[in-house]
Image (tube, grey):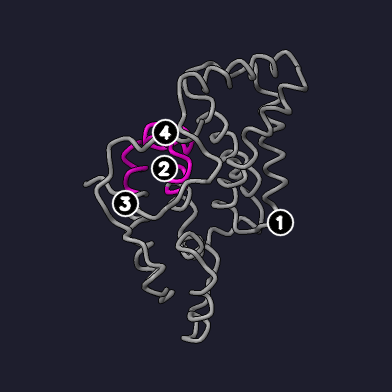
């Protein structure tokens, strides 16, 4: 299978390239959290809140549950900091917790419907009005809401949060080849969905291009 990427899928504005130094700093924060340092937990919360919320927003269509699961994620971080073994980057561990919280919260509930949001097709007039106000990223968001949860999560983790396929396989607890297949299928479906939404040409990104083996590392 050819490696693919979705060009125009933008990283959050406050994300910076990860480095060994930033990961080490986060590991030191976790050590302090494990020692029940509440100030360290506050720092960690501020460091990860936006990214955790971003991931959960992509995999929870019931928007009213996002903040609750953000809080659940950080509660697990607080309780399980001593269990971090350092076998992955801190960001991989945190996103795995958030993903697991999502799965557990919706497991046996009626709200666990796996159907994505229905985004209605627009009239020509509505498309014209939206084209004046929506960026390409806005159109991508509308389209991503129509993808299956696993595919949307794989895209967000890859291009939005900068994890490698190996790291995403850890987060989603599936083989690396499954991650690659989800990303490939999601990019292909995303193009179809954007066509269905009939977005203006000025907002249409080129979605399928050759992708490096490892995306740029932005999660730190």
- Can you name the residue that lies furthest to the left here? 2
Q: Cα distance, mark 3 to mark 4?
A: 19 Å
Q: Is the magenta stretch mostly helix, strand or loop?
A: helix
Quadrant of res 96: top right
Q: Disc 1 or 2, which lies upstream in sequence?
A: 1
Write the residue at 38% across / 62% down.
190
Residue position marked by numbered label 2 in the rendering: 158
Q: Position of residue 27 (x, y in %)?
A: 57, 18
Query: Which residue is labeled 1 in the image?
Result: 64
Of mark 3 and mark 4, the one earlier in the sequence is 3
Q: Distance between the residues labelled 2 and 4?
A: 9 Å
Q: Which residue is drawn at 38% across and 36% down?
A: 216
Q: What element carries label 3?
A: helix
Above or below for 201 versus 80 = below
Q: In this view, does 39 lie above or below 102?
A: above
Q: Position of residue 198 (x, y in %)?
A: 41, 76
* Sooner in the amino-acid sequence: mark 2 or mark 4: 2
Let me know if residue 179 is in the magenta part.
Answer: yes
Q: Do the residues labelled 1 and 4 touch (CB within 8 Å)?
A: no
Q: Kindly report the distance in space between the C-alpha atoms of the residues bearing marks 1 and 2.
A: 25 Å
Query: In the image, residue 102 lies at what x, y percent?
Result: 61, 44
Disc 4 crowd, CA 10 A, few/some/many (<14, 14-19, 20+): some
Badge 4 element? loop
Bounds of the magenta segment: 155-181
Q: Mark 4 points at which residue?
A: 217
Q: Nearer the viewer, mark 3 or mark 4?
A: 4
The disc, 1 or 4, on the residue closer to the chain's N-terminal end is 1
């Amino acid at each position: 299978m050819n490696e693919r990427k979705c060009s125009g899928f933008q990283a959050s504005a406050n994300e910076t390239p990860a480095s060994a130094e930033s990961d080490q700093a986060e590991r030191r924060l976790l050590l302090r959290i494990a020692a029940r340092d509440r100030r360290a937990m506050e720092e960690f919360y501020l460091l990860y809140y936006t990214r955790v919320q971003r991931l959960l927003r992509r995999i929870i269509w019931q928007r009213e549950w996002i903040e609750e699961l953000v809080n659940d994620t950080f509660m697990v971080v607080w309780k399980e900091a001593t269990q971090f073994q350092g076998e992955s980057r801190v960001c991989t561990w945190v996103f795995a917790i958030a993903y697991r919280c999502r799965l557990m919260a919706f497991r046996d509930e009626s709200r666990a419907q796996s159907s994505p949001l229905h985004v209605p097709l627009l009239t020509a007039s509505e498309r014209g009005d939206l084209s004046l106000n929506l960026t390409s990223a806005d159109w991508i968001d509308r389209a991503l809401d129509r993808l299956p949860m696993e595919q949307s999560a794989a895209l967000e983790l890859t291009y939005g949060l900068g994890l490698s396929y190996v790291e995403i396989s850890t987060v989603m607890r599936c083989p690396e080849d499954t991650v690659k297949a989800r990303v490939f299928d999601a990019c292909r479906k995303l193009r179809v969905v954007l066509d269905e939404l009939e977005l203006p040409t000025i907002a249409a990104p080129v979605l399928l291009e050759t992708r490096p083996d490892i995306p740029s590392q932005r999660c730190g």
